[in-house]
Amino acid sequence: EEQLVESGGGLVQPGGSLRLSCAASRFTFSFSWMHWVRQAPGKGLVWVSRISGDGSITSYADSVKGRFTVSRDNAKNTLYLQMNSLRAEDTAVYYCAREKEDYSRAFDYWGQGSLVTVSS
Amino acid sequence: QSALTQPASVSGSPGQSITISCTGTSSDVGVYNYVSWYQQHPGKAPKLMIYEVSNRPSGVSNRFSGSKSGNTASLTISGLQAEDEADYYCSSYTRSSPYVFGTGTKVTVL
């Protein structure tokens, strides 16, 4: 079965930076659009960012635009989220997710989540 | 982009059917058939239950079904079971964001 494993979360001070990674296995990573979705403690899911299979197209939620950068290394089957100028409101569990390969705009595989805490 | 509107909670007894609504606008739910539903148990990652309004991924019980009318999509769980107790989120492709999730609904099995 397809697998996604996130890493890189932790505690960071306001204004700081952090990079999340998402290692993919058991599917053709370079064919898949990949997404980041976050969930603040006790709150709902919020879409954050996406990147096309070849990395040429990216999109961001307004709340992170200009601060977060999504990228990928298809040779390493790994997705990244570089988060800069972090704020308290960025505190959340961050999930990477794969978009279904049939272009149905749904997320069929999710990582286990990586907790990012922004606090002084 | 505002979140899609879902009821905060829905409950039912084992064996009953429940329906969760997901209300959007003419820029998301109303114009695209890219509505999906996710189940999330506490401390776990979301799981895809329905995609493209009414399609079930392989392995998802046929007790779960989806539909849409105008700007509102719905998820129906038939024959409610204890294991269905979880949070449920809808999602839609949009003209702007390009994705938006619902506010989430907690399903309680009485």
Image: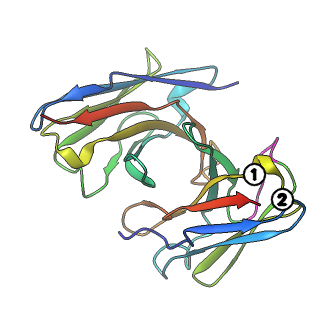
**Residue at left offset 27%, top offset 34%:** A117
For the residue marked with disc 1, what is the amino acid?
Answer: Asp
Which secondary structure lies at badge 1?
helix
Q: Which residue is mark 2?
A: B80
Considering depth in this image, is B62 or B16 the residue closer to the camera? B16
Q: Is residue A46 magenta?
A: no
Magenta stretch, residue numbers? B54-60
For mark 1, name the chain. Answer: B
Q: Where the C terminus of chain A falls, by quadrant?
A: top left
Is A42 situated left or right of B90 in this image?
left
Task: Please state the horizontal and vertical placement of residue B37, each as a whole percent of the image.
Answer: 64, 57
* Mark 2–mark 1 CB contact (< 8 Å): yes
Q: Which residue is mark 1?
A: B84
> Does B80 appear above or below A59?
below
Task: Please state the horizontal and vertical placement of residue B56, each as a whole percent of the image.
Answer: 78, 53
What type of secondary structure mainly makes up the magenta span? Answer: loop
> Does A14 appear above or below B104?
above
Q: Where the N terminus of chain A falls, by quadrant?
A: top right
Considering depth in this image, is B6 or A56 the residue closer to the camera? B6
Task: Please state the horizontal and vertical placement of residue A93, each as a whole percent of the image.
Answer: 40, 38
Task: Please state the horizontal and vertical placement of residue B65, each as a whole percent of the image.
Answer: 79, 63
- Determine the residue located farthest toward the top in the rendered image: A76
Cα distance, mark 2 to mark 1?
Answer: 7 Å
**Residue at left offset 54%, top offset 37%:** B43
Residue A7, by quadrant, is top left
